[in-house]
Image (cartoon, grey):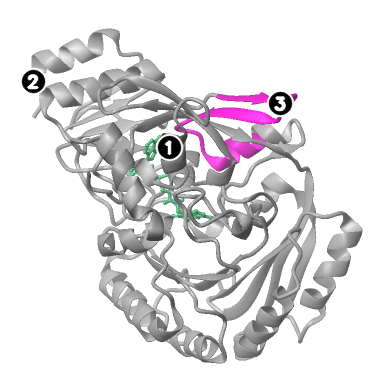
Amino acid sequence: MATTAGTDELRTAFSGWILEPGDDGYEEARRVHNGLVDRRPALIAQCRNTADVADAVRFARAQGLDVCVRGGGHNVAGRAVVDDALMIDLSPLKGIHVDAGARTVRAQGGVLWKELNRETALHGLAVTGGAISTTGIAGLTLGGGLGWLMAKHGLAADNLLSVELVDADGGVREVSEESDPDLLWALRGGGGNFGIAASFEYALHPLAMVTGGLIAHPVDAAADMLRFYRDACATASDDLTVFAALVHAPDGSGMKIAGMVVFHIGTPEEAERDLAPFKEWGSPLVVEVGPMPYQVMNTILDAGYPAGSLNYWMSSFAKGLSDGLIETMVERFASVPSPMSAILLEQFHGAVCRVGVTDTAVPHREEGWNLVLPSVWMDPADTDANIAWTRETHAALGEHLTDRRWLNYLGDDQDSAVRAAYGPNYDRLVEVKRRVDPDNVFRHNHNIAP
Ligand SMILES: Cc1cc2nc3c(=O)[nH]c(=O)nc-3n(C[C@H](O)[C@H](O)[C@H](O)COP(=O)(O)OP(=O)(O)OC[C@H]3O[C@@H](n4cnc5c(N)ncnc54)[C@H](O)[C@@H]3O)c2cc1C
């Protein structure tokens, strides 16, 4: 518990807000995206600048408080908020500065992808962000960051040039390839283990209009569609990324469908040519595909993931899209308890797979698919049924899955998968952790123990 005198001293220079239980804003600030997470920090330090973040870390250490860090608040494990800890909340840190000439952007730790996209779009530029626009840049990038642009430009972490990092002593380090290549390597996918990223600098790429949208088939055609999808993806260029999902119609009817979300960043003519097989296959219920700004493409799935919904996710990279995997997916989807849940395949190919396994902390560089069970529901009475279905489905698919796991999707009960998420990079990450955070101040994350 923090002393009153200590808290008063922290307040004297603090630019942001220090919230205690009972204060206006405390209840709202402790909420994160996943409505299953209901924890009560001792204090919430809402930071407005890097000096606030540094003071908050020093205060926590002096007072013996645990530290947890909130960026966009989207992590399903919900470790941005921890009972009785000091929650260092970066959500007011919204600064974004694009250097159009250098094709870089510097953005602070509370920025969301929709905010970053909007700013970079002013200059006809973009960087890989998440597949939806409401996630935070901080947790997503530190965990690797897969998204629509990864086949062309790699992961968010692959585009990370430097980080303004508040370390475990409350010092500030400018971490770049020149200043500390080892630590930058670790920040490119090693999660929140090494300090608090007050701001991120990314490389940008020219991008304005893309072609994208949804193709939906009757669920009875799901197995055939997934086999077509597997074969059609084999020849996809870096310009084309297609995710496939067994999902429910977005119109609220609750109808089960088999869908493909397509994304193409070439010219309209190239997109027309490459997307024709996807649009023409079978007897689709809906083909809603067309040109749109990238920042709009980044929002088309947002409505399926409302803030405060209850989330339990599992995922693993697939061994390949075998007929056996496809059949089990279809069979398991028949019993899915929530119309908001899906079985999703994220396609990995192109630039993301040309980075070496040990070049960044993210080892997942094989072509193929990440299979995700993003279970989402609204009524707490349905929690047990949804968690049980997700676990049973992951187990039923097990023989078709590798032990490789996407760090950003690990839930609160999946710490045993942290090693699998880092693969052969784990031991080097431990070395960096020992150097920069030997006391494991930053441990409320998918932790790399020093
Ligand atoms: C609907 C939905 C869609 C998603 N889509 C994608 C996707 O397309 N691609 C993908 O890769 N992931 C995706 N994710 C996973 C997402 O990337 C992770 O949950 C990520 O952690 C979210 O970052 P955040 O800043 O919003 O989360 P937070 O919950 O705020 O942070 C997550 C953790 O990251 C650490 N952290 C956060 N900010 C900082 C910081 N500034 N410095 C140091 N540590 C920090 C902390 O340990 C914290 O507990 C999705 C998640 C959801 C719920």
Residue 67 visible at all: yes
Residue type for callout 3: Ala
Question: Pointer 3: what residue?
Answer: 102
Instruction: Give the farthest residue toward the right.
Output: 269
What's the magenta region? 96-118
Frontmost residue, 256 versus 48:
48
Kindly indicate the quadrant of the structure image that contains residue 121. Answer: top right
Q: Which residue is drawn at 50% across and 27% down?
A: 94
Question: Pointer 1: what residue?
Answer: 182
Question: Pointer 2: what residue?
Answer: 3
Q: Is residue 339 left or right of residue 160?
A: left
Query: Mark 3 or mark 1: which is in front?
Result: 1
Residue 44 position within the rendered picture, expressed as x and y whole percent measured from the top left? 25, 30
Residue 431 position within the rendered picture, expressed as x and y whole percent measured from the top left? 30, 43
Q: Residues within 10 Å of mark 1 (few under 14, many from 20)?
A: some
Query: Mark 3 or mark 2: which is in front?
Result: 3
Residue 325 position within the rendered picture, expressed as x and y whole percent measured from the top left? 50, 86
Frontmost residue, 272 versus 101:
101
Q: Is residue 60 left or right of residue 45?
A: left
**Residue 119 against residue 273 in the figure, above or below:** above
**Residue 121 against residue 53 in the figure, above or below:** below
- Locate the C terminus by quadrant: top left
- Locate the N terminus by quadrant: top left
Q: Is residue 434 left or right of residue 302?
A: left
Q: Which residue is drawn at 65% across and 86% down?
A: 227
**Magenta run includes residue 103:** yes
